[in-house]
Amino acid sequence: MRALISVSDKSGVVEFARELEKLGFEIVSTGGTYKLLKEKGVKAVEISEVTKFPEMFDGRVKTLNPMIHGGILHRRDLPEHVATAKEHGITGIDLVCVNLYPFKETIARTDDFDEIIENIDIGGPAMVRSAAKNFADVLIVTDVADYDHVLERLRKGEDTPAFRRDLMIKAYEHTAAYDAMIANYMNSRFHNGFGQKQFIVGEKVFDTRYGENPHQKGALYEFEDFFTKHFKALKGEASFNNMTDINGALKIAASFGKAPAVSIIKHANPCGFAICDNLYESYVEALKCDPISAFGGVVAINGTLDKQLAEKINEIFTEVIIAANVDAEALEVFANKKRIKIFTQESDYLQLANDAYDFKHIDGGFVYQESDKVGDNEVRDAKQVSQKAATEREMKDLEIAYKVASLTKSNCVVYVKNGAMVAIGMGMTSRVDAAKCALEKAKESGLDVTGSAMASEAFFPFRDSIDAAAKAGVSAVIEPGGSIRDDEVIAAADEHGMSLYFSEVRHFLH
């Protein structure tokens, strides 16, 4: 039996090769892998001894040879293949262990295009694809994490067709992801990220119990290793819908840096948000906005969930808590609650992946775009268009309202007072209705919006929303501006003695 080993990631490869030797494999290797194995006492054969050709063109050609690919690809169950291999002195290769040149690490390290080109693997993917194609006769190993499993199967004689098939699928996933990464990089470098093909590749983190509904399958995938590093289940199992709600809650709560922010989400929409002196107070104030909707909702905590806060949250049914960190005493508070799910990022503050691009499925395909981001300076640098300027407190409330509005389904209007959201209207077909609905909800909850700051993620087309806000007691407003009737809107703000700012940036969320 013969094994070909050629890896860029050399972790565990010496031990893997030694165990293969014990199982009777002759080891064939290349370049740096060969040198390492020889240094560590593995009786490896250099690839050039098999091909009868030296490495050429600075290593660009070393495995692209019939002695290699013939050894991998010939079918052992076809007499004519076996005869041809024998005629040409081709020895069968029964296991191929390959992982590819570190293209990802290269583009992270340098912008030198010549160096980047040289770190595009050619021989590696060719060997992986050859071995995967002939998986019935050849084991293909592309993942360091599979070394022990492969060895165990070989020792027990359990390298079954199903096992080989799974390794084959993993191998094609490996080369497909590699080629996708190269194509996406080239399009990013030369076509502003929008080439003729767009590849979206994710690594499975876990299966969800089902999708949005019980008859649908679902799973979580990650682009890099964000969830592997920043998502740990402490209690319960995350569902498909939980993950979309958590995403909405995280984006809002993490948008304020290290501030003690708490956001409450229901069906991916915010129903409570506050930033107070501490997380406990923030939760109490956030809950006041819409306690009915908060029942069975998702709470995101930009800091540590402690026992005091846990006991307060435990006063109503909450389905999911996501916190930067969770104390053991806090977790104990929910020990007897079977339905609650608790997750942590095990960090000081909530983290976001900050993906560069965003996409949305539509029937027959998807639309793809650069991710929308709310700049920290958009409120600070907003243009004052009214005669009256906002106070320092109003500016802080405007920033909260503006960020929440920017991360909420359009049409959206948000009211914030003393660091807490007091009303929100979202997902409406009419911006006027969004404003009115928010005020009506605040009235039902007994919340006074007098002196609050209001934000809209898109311009007000008419002055009627300003008139309604003034009637409710709103003192400061921020919106993008850009309506043909901006002058009327500004005049309305001045008539009512309100401060009005134009951010000149629209943040629609559909």
Image: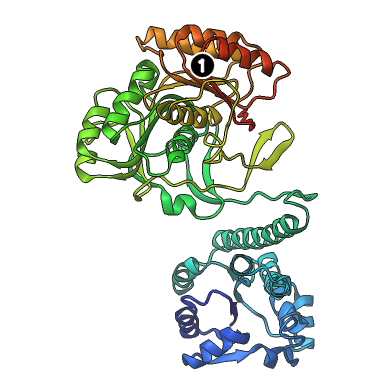
Count all numbered tags in the image, as a single digit. Answer: 1
Q: Dot 1 corresponds to which residue? A: 498
Residue shown at the point (23%, 28%) measured from the top left: 312
Residue ID at (51%, 16%)? 498
- Residue 508 against residue 130 in the figure, above or below: above
Q: Position of residue 406 (x, y in %)?
A: 55, 30
The residue lying toward the viewer, choosing from 480 and 45, is 480
Please tell me which residue lies in front, 483 or 223.
483
Above or below — where is 117 with respect to 189? below
Location of residue 209 by image quarter: top left
Neighbourhood count class around disc 1 (C-alpha, 10 Å): few under 14, some 14–19, many 20 upward = many
The answer to whether residue 429 is seen in the rendering is: no
Residue at the outermost front position: 387
For badge 1, the amino acid type reads Met
Left or right placement of residue 334 versus residue 420 in this view: left
Tag 1's secondary structure? loop
Query: Which residue lies at the image location 56% right of the left edge and 51% below the top edge?
Result: 223
